[in-house]
Amino acid sequence: MSIKQVTGFIVVVAMAAAGCRVRATGYVEPPPPVEVRATVATPPPPSASVTVTAGQPQVYSGVQVVQATCTQGGAEQCNGLDDNCNGQIDEGCGYASGAIQITLAWGSGADLDLYVTDPNGETLSYMNRQVSSGGYLDHDARGNCNPSQANNRIENVYWNSPQPPRGTYRVEVHYWGECNSGAGVTPLTLSVAVGGRVIGAYTFGIAPQQRIPVVTFSI
Ligand SMILES: [Ca+2]
Ligand SMILES: [Ca+2]
Ligand SMILES: [Ca+2]
């Protein structure tokens, strides 16, 4: 061993003895941690500019038309009606509005179900909460079958695409069951808004197990 080699060996031993880290040749720094964020799929927000219009709705026999009694600037209640006349039904209640909004509310502990069939023949309901034309059922409710849920007597459907498909939309309601409420015939209220305007509000007393086409409308 030459003097130079001996000197180098002594330096390395001295460094190690002093607590210094002596790196071996070929040492590679570990890569920095990479932050990965998962994206949860949620429906996009309703469109701000909509120019959809609807023709005169056709109402099922026995369904009563509710005369609008909204008050501009008034308080919006979670009741299936546009209380403040702004063309959105129950805004602030936890379900959405859009180019089309259909909201069902009922007045007992029964479980009623909203069905909306679009011009393509696809039907939104609690069993099928999204259709390819851009419609969603974003609030399903079960009355006394799910008493802890907020607004458990309201179901809501909306389209947030700027131009939902043209054609006829069919809105049905089914009385699924009484949920041990002994509710019997149950009053329902159903409102339809198209293009930021309520085109109709309706009421009907629906019997257990009954299913009726409350209203159809075309855009
Ligand atoms: Ca409103
Ligand atoms: Ca309301
Ligand atoms: Ca239901």
Image (cartoon, rainbow, N blue to C red):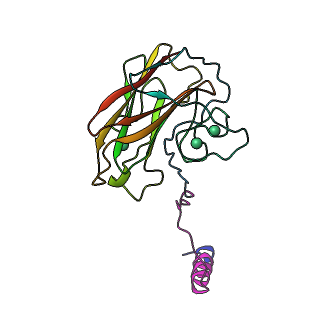
In the displayed structure, 65 sits above or below 16; it is: above
How far from the left and from the top, in percent, is residue 112? 36, 41
Q: For residue 18, say whether it is visible.
A: yes
Q: In this view, does 23 lie to the left or right of 59?
A: right
Query: Which residues fall within the magenta stretch?
Result: 6-32
Q: Does the magenta stretch include residue 188?
A: no
Q: For residue 157, say whether it is visible.
A: no
What residue lies at 55% left-to-right and 54% top-to-bottom?
A: 34
Q: Does the magenta stretch include residue 8?
A: yes
The picture quadrant for ligand 2 comes to top right
Q: Is residue 11 left or right of residue 206?
A: right
Give the total number of marks visible in the rendering. Answer: 0
What residue lies at 26% left-to-right and 37% top-to-bottom?
A: 209
In the displayed structure, 180 sits above or below 107; it is: below
Q: Which is more toward the observer, 30 or 103?
A: 103
What residue lies at 43% left-to-right and 55% top-to-bottom?
A: 149
Which residue in the rendered view is the most extreme toward the bottom? 17
Q: In which quarter of the image is residue 124?
A: top left
Which residue in the rendered view is the most extreme toward the right? 73
Q: Which is more toward the observer, 79 or 53?
A: 79
Q: Which is more toward the observer, 83 or 113?
A: 83
Q: In which quarter of the image is residue 15?
A: bottom right
How far from the left and from the top, in percent, is residue 190? 48, 34
Quick one: quadrant of the N terminus? Answer: bottom right
What residue lies at 53% left-to-right and 20% top-to-bottom?
A: 164
How far from the left and from the top, in percent, is residue 35? 55, 54
How far from the left and from the top, in percent, is residue 134? 49, 27
